[in-house]
Image (cartoon, grey):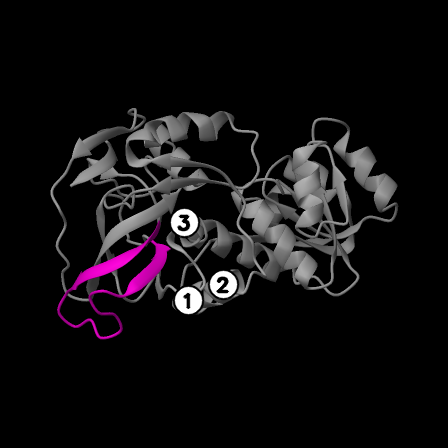
């Protein structure tokens, strides 16, 4: 099969012929139809995960997938060949990925049925970013009428987080460049936008003089953002910020780990199929174009997700 792989830490991603995988016990083989770029993919390709996670080279890149079950291994009872599914490749080591024509994943984690009303392209950009967005919003648990600042709102995780927080009745302040980015943030439910290229703190204080109730730290300086939160407020961080890094500030901080269990994936899929959670796709790449997608992702100022069409 054709797949996008990396031969060593930091090596340029390449499209190569790879052996077609076979499912083992408790595993499901999927013909991949769609996928997408995530920050995790960029870190993996750049070699930033060296020493943190076991790598089994050559590593096939890609986490998200949507496709069709073609084969199930011994002991699989929840899925059958021909079923449409989506999810996130979730294995202890890095070797198998979704930027290929086929992928094998465990039945128990990172896999869910594709509901009617959700196509492959939309499902292929939902998994990892949607899980991270939901975990980030859940961690700060915004109440109706509270003010939430989302730093990195225009990104893949952020544009989902804006919608999820606004749906709970929060007043969302989203970071976005003036123009199309800001316009889309308002369409997705943000009450206000602030431009991160200018004095972000001053813009936020003008909107919330007493401070915001919570912050989603998806980009930017954690300490600066923490200074904008009211005493006793909350912060969630996908970038690893923790209380030890924020001094003696009076706030609770949660470092986010995106866990794509079946309940979370089902919930996200239901929301997306019902058009209550809308993916923004800036561009779609074919499998042969994925190496270019990595370059574009690292310098992109676009909103939302970069999608990948496999089949």
Label 1: few (<14), some (14–19) or many (≥20) C-alpha neighbours in 10 Å: few
Q: Which residues are magenta?
A: 65-88
Q: Quadrant of residue 182?
A: top right
Kindly report the distance in space between the C-alpha atoms of the residues bearing marks 2 and 1: 7 Å
Magenta run includes residue 78: yes
x%, y% of residue 37?
Answer: 41, 39
What residue did someone put label 1 on? Answer: 116
- Residue at left offset 26%, top offset 58%: 68
Of residues 187 and 264, which is closer to you in this image? 187
Compared to 155, does 291 lie above or below? above
Earlier along the polypeptide chain: callout 1 or callout 3? 1
Q: Along the horizontal axis of the image, is 310 left or right of 218?
A: left
> From where the camera sits, is residue 80 visible?
yes
Q: Which mark is residue 121?
A: 3
Compared to 139, does 201 lie above or below? above
Question: Which SS class for mark 3?
Answer: helix
């Amino acid at each position: 099969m054709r797949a996008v792989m990396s031969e060593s830490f930091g090596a340029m991603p390449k499209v190569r012929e790879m052996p077609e995988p076979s499912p083992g016990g408790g595993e499901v083989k999927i013909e991949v139809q769609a996928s997408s770029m995530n920050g995790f993919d960029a870190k993996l390709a750049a070699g930033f995960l060296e020493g943190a996670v076991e790598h089994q080279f050559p590593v096939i890149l890609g986490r998200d997938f949507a496709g069709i079950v073609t084969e199930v291994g011994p002991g699989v009872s929840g899925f059958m060949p021909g079923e449409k599914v989506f999810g996130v490749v979730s294995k202890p080591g890095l070797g198998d990925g979704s930027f290929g024509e086929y992928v094998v994943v465990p039945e128990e984690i990172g896999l869910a049925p594709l509901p009617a009303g959700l196509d492959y392209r939309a499902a292929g950009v939902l998994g990892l970013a949607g899980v991270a967005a939901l975990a980030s919003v859940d961690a700060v648990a915004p109440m109706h009428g509270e003010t939430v600042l989302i730093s990195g709102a225009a990104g893949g995780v952020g544009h989902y987080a804006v919608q999820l927080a606004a749906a709970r009745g929060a007043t969302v302040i989203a970071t976005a460049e003036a123009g199309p980015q800001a316009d889309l943030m308002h369409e997705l439910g943000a009450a206000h936008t602030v431009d991160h290229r200018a004095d972000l703190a001053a813009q936020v204080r003008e909107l919330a003089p007493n401070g915001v109730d919570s912050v989603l730290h998806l980009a930017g300086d954690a300490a600066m953002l923490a200074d904008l939160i009211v005493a006793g407020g909350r912060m969630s961080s996908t970038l690893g910020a923790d209380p030890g890094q924020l001094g003696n500030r009076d706030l609770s901080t949660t470092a986010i780990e995106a866990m794509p269990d079946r309940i979370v994936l089902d919930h996200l899929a239901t929301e997306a199929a019902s058009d209550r959670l809308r993916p923004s796709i800036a561009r779609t790449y074919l499998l042969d174009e994925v190496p270019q997608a990595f370059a574009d992702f690292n310098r992109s100022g676009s909103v939302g997700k970069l999608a990948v069409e496999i089949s």
